[in-house]
Image (cartoon, rainbow, N blue to C red):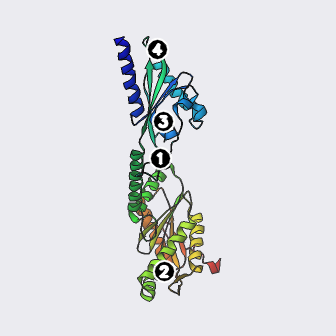
């Protein structure tokens, strides 16, 4: 009689613990029928224990990926080892709404879960226990930190006025692409360009107007370039555009298209119309070029030829001489 009372007492305390603990506890048999469904699971699912007991789990939660979950459970049944899954592998096992006020921006509860074997006195595993941990706060904080780090990384790489790559990051990417070219020999071309008579724009309309002209040029570059092209503000009113998998002749087509856009689309600033043009220099990567700095130097040399020949034109660098192959819109 005393042993029976002791067993009842132990069972009572075990039941109280299962129901009051702030984690989800689900016990399944080999047919994935629910044997235990504690208060945590009831509160978050809205399903009472008597509704789901001895019922197949997947009937109530069809969104659980069945094959994936069964693979994990079968390994626990067979090997009698624990299995784990974190929110980073899968955000949740049970799709519960998130009610935490601090992380209210998250729609669903993020969960880590553990699957434990429940062995009988004979050492057989007839059931498994699934322990569900609400880690929404942790997941939210980590996501915010990652987003913050991503934002800081972008800020460190981005020119604030133009939203293009800043000089440091743009030149780093150029160096990487030049190294790749040396290894694989893919055709790349670099365009260096700047705004003609930019000092006159600042002197006539003021520096805020000059900033607007730079922003306008940067926007045009972003709209015209491909996703694989790498554009950056090199300094002041000078820009660099690396055209990947592009030879010099096709880079010239791109350059003249951009030049015509800038020439024909005037900037309106404080009711004043500002007309500007750009000059461009082009060089194609070459096996004889020592490094990426030399690539910039060659494109700059071609740019200076465009300037000296009257501006508003594009020039391809040719070694040992510079050959002016610029085509103005009104001469094409």
Outermost residue, front side: 1
> In the image, which disc is placed on residue 98?
1
* Alpha carbon distance from label 3 to label 1: 13 Å
Q: Which residue is mark 2?
A: 196
Tell which tag, 1 or 2, sits nearer the viewer.
1
Q: Position of residue 95 (x, y in %)?
A: 53, 41
Q: Quadrant of residue 166?
A: bottom left
Tell which tag, 3 or 1, sits nearer the viewer.
3
Closer to the camera, 123 or 280? 123
x 44%, y 22%: residue: 117
Residue 18 is left or right of residue 65, and the answer is: left
Closer to the camera, 166 or 321? 166
- In contact (CB < 8 Å): disc 4 and disc 3: no
Tell which tag, 4 or 3, sits nearer the viewer.
3
* Alpha carbon distance from label 4 to label 2: 83 Å
> In the image, which disc is placed on residue 124?
4
Q: Quadrant of the C terminus?
A: bottom right
Q: Position of residue 43 (x, y in %)?
A: 48, 39
Q: Position of residue 208 (x, y in %)?
A: 43, 81
Q: Secondary structure at mark 4?
A: loop
Tell which tag, 4 or 2, sits nearer the viewer.
4
Tell which tag, 4 or 1, sits nearer the viewer.
1
Instruction: Check disc 2: other Cα within 10 Å, few if <14, some if 14-19, many if 20+.
Output: some
Q: Secondary structure at mark 3?
A: helix
- In contact (CB < 8 Å): disc 4 and disc 1: no
x 40%, y 21%: residue: 11
Tell which tag, 3 or 2, sits nearer the viewer.
3
Q: Secondary structure at mark 2?
A: loop
> In the image, which disc is placed on residue 41?
3
Whether residue 90 is visible: no
Q: Earlier in the sequence, mark 4 or mark 1?
A: 1
């Amino acid at each position: 009689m005393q042993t029976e009372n002791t067993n009842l007492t132990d069972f009572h305390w075990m039941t109280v613990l299962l129901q009051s603990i702030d984690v989800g506890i689900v016990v399944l048999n080999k047919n994935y029928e629910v044997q235990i469904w504690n208060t945590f699971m009831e509160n978050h699912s809205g399903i009472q224990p008597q509704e789901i007991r001895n019922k197949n789990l997947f009937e109530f939660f069809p969104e659980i990926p069945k094959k994936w979950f069964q693979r994990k459970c079968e390994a626990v049944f067979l090997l009698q080892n624990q299995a784990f899954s974190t929110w980073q592998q899968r955000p949740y096992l049970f799709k519960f709404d998130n009610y935490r006020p601090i992380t209210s921006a998250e729609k669903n509860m993020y969960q880590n879960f553990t699957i434990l074997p429940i062995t009988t006195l004979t050492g057989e595993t007839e059931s498994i226990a699934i322990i569900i941990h609400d880690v929404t706060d942790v997941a939210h904080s980590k996501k915010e930190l990652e987003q913050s780090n991503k934002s800081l990384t972008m800020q460190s790489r981005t020119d604030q006025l133009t939203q293009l790559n800043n000089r440091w990051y743009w030149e780093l990417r150029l160096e990487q692409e030049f190294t790749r070219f040396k290894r694989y020999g893919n055709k790349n071309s670099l365009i260096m360009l700047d705004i003609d008579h930019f000092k006159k724009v600042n002197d006539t309309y003021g520096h805020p107007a000059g900033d607007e002209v730079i922003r306008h040029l940067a926007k045009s570059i972003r709209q015209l370039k491909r996703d694989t092209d790498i554009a950056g503000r090199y300094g002041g009113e000078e820009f660099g555009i690396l055209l990947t998998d592009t030879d010099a002749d096709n880079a010239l087509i791109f350059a003249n298209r951009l030049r015509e856009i800038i020439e024909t689309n005037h900037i309106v600033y404080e009711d004043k119309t500002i007309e500007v043009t750009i000059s461009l220099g082009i060089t194609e990567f070459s096996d004889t070029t020592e490094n990426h700095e030399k690539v910039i130097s060659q494109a700059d040399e071609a740019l200076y030829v465009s300037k000296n020949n009257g501006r508003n034109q594009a020039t391809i660098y040719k070694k040992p001489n510079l050959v002016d192959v610029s085509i103005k819109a009104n001469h094409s």
